[in-house]
Amino acid sequence: DQQVKQNSPSLSVQEGRISILNCDYTNSMFDYFLWYKKYPAEGPTFLISISSIKDKNEDGRFTVFLNKSAKHLSLHIVPSQPGDSAVYFCAASGNAGNMLTFGGGTRLMVKP
Amino acid sequence: DADVTQTPRNRITKTGKRIMLECSQTKGHDRMYWYRQDPGLGLRLIYYSFDVKDINKGEISDGYSVSRQAQAKFSLSLESAIPNQTALYFCATGASASYNEQFFGPGTRLTVL
């Protein structure tokens, strides 16, 4: 069974509005979470991360929220831009050695 | 220049053929990883290596083997390719001093007919 799940395969948002991408996990040993962004014909690139000792981390237009009790995290993009259109992967880690468990991805489409 | 490169970028082969995918990195990282991506399943770990003398199986290693020829090179082999190995393959690197972040190559699209 998948330990990291992104239940929305796709999301469509109007330019300028907020995009909210969600991720749920089941393994309580996970203590570090990352979001990766992937454009077609390219590899995933690191976007933002959060440690389990925090509940929020912000970097420009991107904010990640972590709710440990619900085992849920979300990525907020405000304002959304057409260049944000990509597949977003949530990933989690619970040990040293950079071992990551990925979710299935959410395809975000930002319409002009 | 790209920090993590993969060759070939695309490959079409037939069932039963042996295939090697190569990965090189200039980031100076100790740790290297091979993943495959399938629609809806995200990226799943095939093999990983923490240094030249270290090889470890990941979540889905059956049907694959790897070789860490040098710190900068990590190759993935399919000894006898089968159609359900058709996927997008990514190599990644990680620095032991950098907790968790990994850096990915551009991917190899493999089709097994």
Image: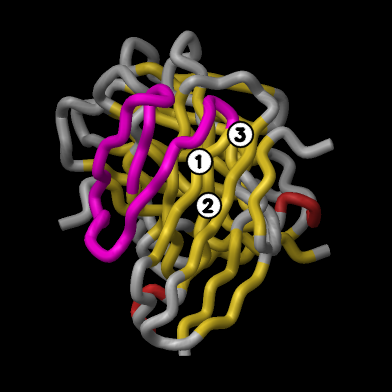
- Residue A72 location (% of width, % of height): 30, 38
Residue that numbered label 3 is attached to = A47
| Residue closest to the eye, B18 or B104 | B18
Q: Tell me which residue sits at (66%, 38%) in the image.
A: B4
User: Which of these two is toward me, B71 or A4?
Assistant: B71
Check disc 3: other Cα within 10 Å, few if <14, some if 14-19, many if 20+.
Answer: some
> Three-letter amino acid code at disc 3?
Leu
Mark linked to residue B90: 2
Same chain letter for marks 1 and 3: no
Q: Tell me if label 1 and label 2 are in contact, CB under 8 Å.
A: no
Span shown in magenta: B47-72
In the picture, residue A77 is in which quadrant? Answer: top right
Chain of the residue on which disc 1 is drawn: B
Task: Evaluate whether residue A2 shows in this view.
Answer: yes
Q: Nearer the viewer, residue A98 or A34?
A: A98
The three-letter amino acid code for the residue at tag 1 is: Phe
Q: Are marks 3 and 2 in contact (CB under 8 Å)?
A: no
The chain carrying label 3 is A
Q: How many marks?
A: 3
Residue under the image location 83 percent in, 63 percent down: A112
State the residue position of label 1: B74
Q: Is residue B96 left or right of residue B105?
A: left
Q: Which mark is residue B25?
A: none
Q: Is residue B27 magenta?
A: no
- Residue B89: where, in percent of width, then height? 50, 59
Task: Choose mark 3 or mark 2, whichever is in front.
Answer: 2
Q: Amino acid at mark 2?
A: Phe
